[in-house]
Amino acid sequence: MSDTIFTKIINKEIPADIVFEDDSCIAFHDVNPQAPTHILVIPKIQIARLAEAGEEDQALLGHLMLKTREIAKNLGFEDAYRVVINNGEGAGQTVFHLHIHLLAGRPFSWPPG
Ligand code: AMP
């Protein structure tokens, strides 16, 4: 797969408001927030979308989810937040580097738009 804007963030070629980073993932504020708190949690390896993840990514996917939970807690959100993965253009994906949206700080309705 080709590089995306997120590769540049991982490589620190463009700035981002980073809230967490370790060897396998990085989390930063979304530049166009859809809630008072809107964080993106992404793997450092390139996986275009969830549909492209394989069995070999099982531990990484679990790590991303647990880090999302940890980041939410550290930001003061334990009881009410939404976690979203848009998979494919038809579901609203615009950046083809797997990412988890963590949204918090406002009420969320269901079903989502
Ligand atoms: P999606 O539509 O699910 O692919 O989400 C991509 C997200 O990346 C959108 O919410 C964008 O606002 C966000 N985004 C795009 N470029 C940047 C950037 N340079 N820094 C932070 N967030 C970005």
Image (cartoon, grey):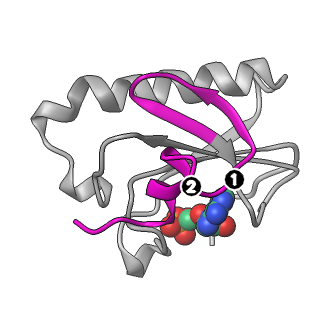
Placement of the C terminus among the 4 image quadrants: bottom right
Q: Which residue is mark 1?
A: 15
Determine the residue located farthest toward the left in the rendered image.
55
Which of the 4 image quarters holds residue 19?
top right
Say what secondary structure mark 2 lies in.
Answer: loop
Residue 15 is inside the magenta segment? yes
Q: Where 4 sits versus 50, above or below?
A: below
Give the residues drawn in magenta, as a range: 1-27
Q: Which residue is mark 2?
A: 13
Which of the 4 image quarters holds residue 52?
bottom left
Placement of the N terminus among the 4 image quadrants: bottom left
Left or right position of 32 against 113? right
- Percent of width and height locating residue 59: 26, 22
Q: Which quadrant of the figure shows ligand 1?
A: bottom right
- Percent of width and height locating residue 67: 54, 23
- Amino acid carrying label 2: it is Glu
The answer to whether any part of residue 112 appears in the image is no
Left or right position of 68 against 25? right
